[in-house]
Amino acid sequence: MTASLLAGTSLDARADIVCILAEHALAPASAAPAEQGEAERRRKNMMSMLDTAMLPVAIVELPSRQPLLVNDAWRHLFGIKQTVGPLSRLPADVLEQIDRVSEAGGSKLHVPELALKTKGRPEHVTLMARPLRDAKGSIMGAVLACADITDEVIARDLDVGLDVLVWGGPMNGETDYVNGAWTRYTGNVPVTGPWIHPDDRPRCANAFVEAARQRASSDIEVRLRRGDGEYRWHRVRFGKDGARWHGFAHDIHDARNVAVERDELGVRERAARADAEQANRLKDQFLAAVSHELRAPLTTMLLWEKVLRGTKESDELRAKALDVIRLSVQAQSRIVGDLLDVSRAASGKLHVDLRQVDIGTVIEEAITAAAPSAVAKQLALVREGATLLGDVQGDAARLRQVFENLLSNAIKFTEPGGRVTVSASRHGRTVVISIADTGRGIAAEFMPRLFEPFTQVEDELTRRAGGLGLGLAIAKQLIELHHGVLTAASDGLGRGATFTVALPASRSRRAPSPPAGVTRAQLLRGRKILVVDDDVRVRDALALLLERAGASITTAESAESARARIDQAVPQALVCDIAMPGEDGYSFIQALRARGIRAPAVALTAHASEHAARRAIEAGFDRHLAKPIDVDRLIVCLHELVTSQR
């Protein structure tokens, strides 16, 4: 009850309450036995209430200065064990205040700040002393009430707030003082415990030594462990005052986290801005490269078309013009194909049609296709290693695309007089193909980005060679779709490069198909083939080229016209465009299959997506070929289909 009564009031008011209680407790009892018993009981209750009060209180008889009562809070403050007895162990400053009560003639005294002259830790109190009177009004003693203000005094001297953690001790490094904020923060954990984060202890020790030498240390940021086990960041400084040191810590954990988050956000924003700027630069460079790579072959074709229109050119010049136009068309086709492939790869729609493929044949076809470029650049194109490699589960066209790309790069970046070597071998269940050159090589710092799309080394040779920087990225993804691995190695600039493809070998064997890269003049001899296309230029050109392969060709400009031709005579095979006015190729082939006509059919379309290929097969076509058409591949495809049907 007394504790709650005194809580939250000023020291002066609390001292008044204590005096009233003490006067009632010490009032002399009446002579009547019954009243004496009641007075004694009341006195004991009052004394018990004072003894349990949280305010340090001492009641002293005057002038003897003998204590009538010293409560628990007082004994704890001054280190007195006995309840009553001599006050000789009290600081002299306190005893002086007791004497001043008598000298003051009954006036109450207030000492705002009293430094107790004790050895060891500093102690400061504020003291209220007031007279205790008997029933006649005479001064019979004094009531002393104290409050410990050590934390407030030290905080004032250090110029810090009461919420700052403060601790200190003698210069031998011991700690004999912690303030209330420290006690609340640590949950009254002893200061000798591991309250500093292990990683921060060396800095604390260095700061302590610095303070001992220079009276004060620099600010350091360390982590202090809270009572619940959490480490929080604080800004700590150590200082020296005579024979004692002190340390104080400001909690900066939340502010530091905000600063860290702000810095991280700033870093992310700068990185995002740099990425956006880099992306814009790459986009501009890419668009410029696409424009150049598309316009250059167009310009070449238009110029040589003008040459062909001349009437006086020699057969040699006309042949050269045709070769240049063919190469330009192929270059433009590769660019469009690469753009479509990288778009499919980005959306996860890049697929391969896995079948039994003679990998040796695919390699030879790629070498044959690359040979003219190597000869034109005066390079030695060498084939080494095994020739009988067996089959792999693969997409022949896609594998050919990979090897042609690797060979094209090797030739592109090797100076005249150099060497490009294609070696192949089989190791157990793995077929390994390496393409090595003696060219410019690859810098070590560029190697990690080698297979990223739109990535090219910025130098004169790369600009002269052209390209969009897509080939290696597409090649790597295609090989991975074949469950294989594509790697690159180089000893550095000027030391050449080696690209290695490792593919899992197929368990089964089959006889190799005719090479798709070589035209067989009479491969379609005697075959009756229907060509359906609404574009007369494409239709007539296909008819002419297939006739050169020995086929007997009938043409139709629409699905309706094609049905009329079939009603007259069912062909052994048909080649049909997909995008035709009126009725498209899908509907046409579905109607034929519904009639029971099983002649092999090849779909031709400018839609080169995997979805378009699947849709064509599902509609009833046997094969799907994307425009621009590789006529040699079409001839071999028709040969395989007709032969298979027989």
Image: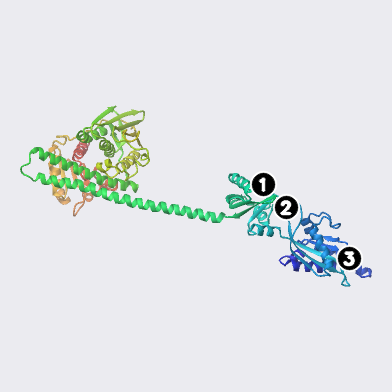
Residue contact between numbered discs 1 and 2, judged by CB atoms under 8 Å = no
- The crowding category of the residue bearing disc 2, from other C-alpha atoms within 10 Å (few below 14, some 14 to 19, many at least 20), is some
For marks 2 and 3, give the one nearer the viewer. Answer: 2
Secondary structure category for the residue under label 1 = loop
Q: Is residue 602 left or right of residue 450?
A: left
Quarter containing the N terminus: bottom right
Name which of mark 3 and mark 1 comes first in the sequence. 3
Real-space Cα separation, disc 3 to disc 1, in angstroms: 49 Å
Give whichever of 58, 169 is nearer the camera: 169
Real-space Cα separation, disc 2 to disc 3, in angstroms: 41 Å
Name which of mark 2 and mark 3 comes first in the sequence. 3
Secondary structure category for the residue under label 3 = helix
For badge 1, the amino acid type reads Gly
Q: Quadrant of residue 393?
A: top left
Residue, far left = 312
Give whichever of 411, 59 is nearer the camera: 59
For badge 2, the amino acid type reads Arg
Q: Quadrant of residue 161?
A: bottom right
Real-space Cα separation, disc 1 to disc 2, in angstroms: 19 Å
For marks 3 and 1, give the one nearer the viewer. Answer: 1
Quarter containing the C terminus: top left
Q: Which mark is residue 193?
A: 1
Q: Is residue 354 above or below residue 595?
A: above
Residue contact between numbered discs 3 and 1, judged by CB atoms under 8 Å = no
Examine the rendering and report whether any part of residue 387 can be seen. Answer: no
Q: Is residue 142 left or right of residue 259?
A: right
Residue plotted at (83% across, 65% down) = 142
Write down the residue under mark 3.
40
Q: Position of residue 189 (x, y in %)?
A: 68, 50
Name which of mark 1 and mark 2 comes first in the sequence. 2
